[in-house]
Amino acid sequence: MQTVKNGDTVKVHYHGRLTNGTTFDSSEGRAPLEFKVGAGMVIKGFENGVLDMKVGDKKTIHIPVDQAYGPKSDEMIMDFPKENIPADLNPEVGMELQMSNPQGQVFQVKVAAIGDEFITLDANHALAGEDLVFDLELVEIA
């Protein structure tokens, strides 16, 4: 029976959770995730986790921070002047916003703190700094 190798396109059902058991994503009730192994379409630990699986195989993988979204970076936390915030926006701690850099690339930030003159924005990925656990089921190798 064929096993997954680099270059294969696969379809996988998954349930992703933090090490404390909190679910952060799942394909339940949706189509399985489809990606090409080795193409960098998913995090490295997820890609490595499907290698050598056969259709119908199920397993649980543990992905350390360095093979997931990396550690939290202080460089991704910035103070943004309140005077530059649109007047109709009332930021609250935890609120997710979209910003764009000078090159026009759009990225997500989260309001981390609100001060008198600045709001602190965190542009780290929401799962940065976290070890992840995935339950996988290989549905198809194309």
Image: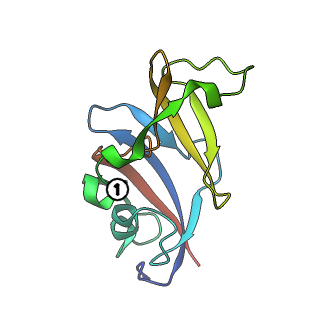
Coordinates of residue 118 in the picture (x, y in percent): 49, 25
- Expressed as whole percent of the image width and height from the top left, the position of residue 140 reads 55, 70
Q: Position of residue 90 (x, y in %)?
A: 64, 17
Q: Give the structural element (helix, strand or loop) at label 1.
A: loop
Q: Quick check: 129 above or below 88?
A: below
> Left or right: 98 with respect to 13?
right
Residue pointed to by mark 1? 68
Q: Residue at x 48, y 15 (%)?
A: 116
Q: Quadrant of residue 45?
A: bottom left
Name the colour scheme: rainbow
Q: Is residue 110 left or right of residue 71?
A: right
* Residue depicted at x 47% and y 69%: 55
Q: Residue furthest right?
A: 88
Number of numbered labels in the structure image: 1
Q: Quadrant location of residue 92?
A: top right
> On screen, 25 above or below 63?
above
Q: Taking 31 as reference, is 72 left or right?
A: left
Could you tell me which residue is drawn at 34 percent across and 56 percent down?
A: 68
Q: Closer to the camera, 124 or 14?
A: 124
In terms of depth relative to the viewer, which is nearer, 98 or 79? 79
The image quadrant where one finds the C terminus is bottom right
Q: Amino acid at mark 1?
A: Ala
Q: Quadrant of the N terminus?
A: bottom left
Q: Is residue 63 visible?
A: no
User: Where does residue 132 sit, x and y in percent of width and height?
Assistant: 32, 47
Decide if residue 96 is in sight here.
yes
Crowding at dot 1, Cα within 10 Å, few <14 / some 14-19 / many 20+, comes out as many
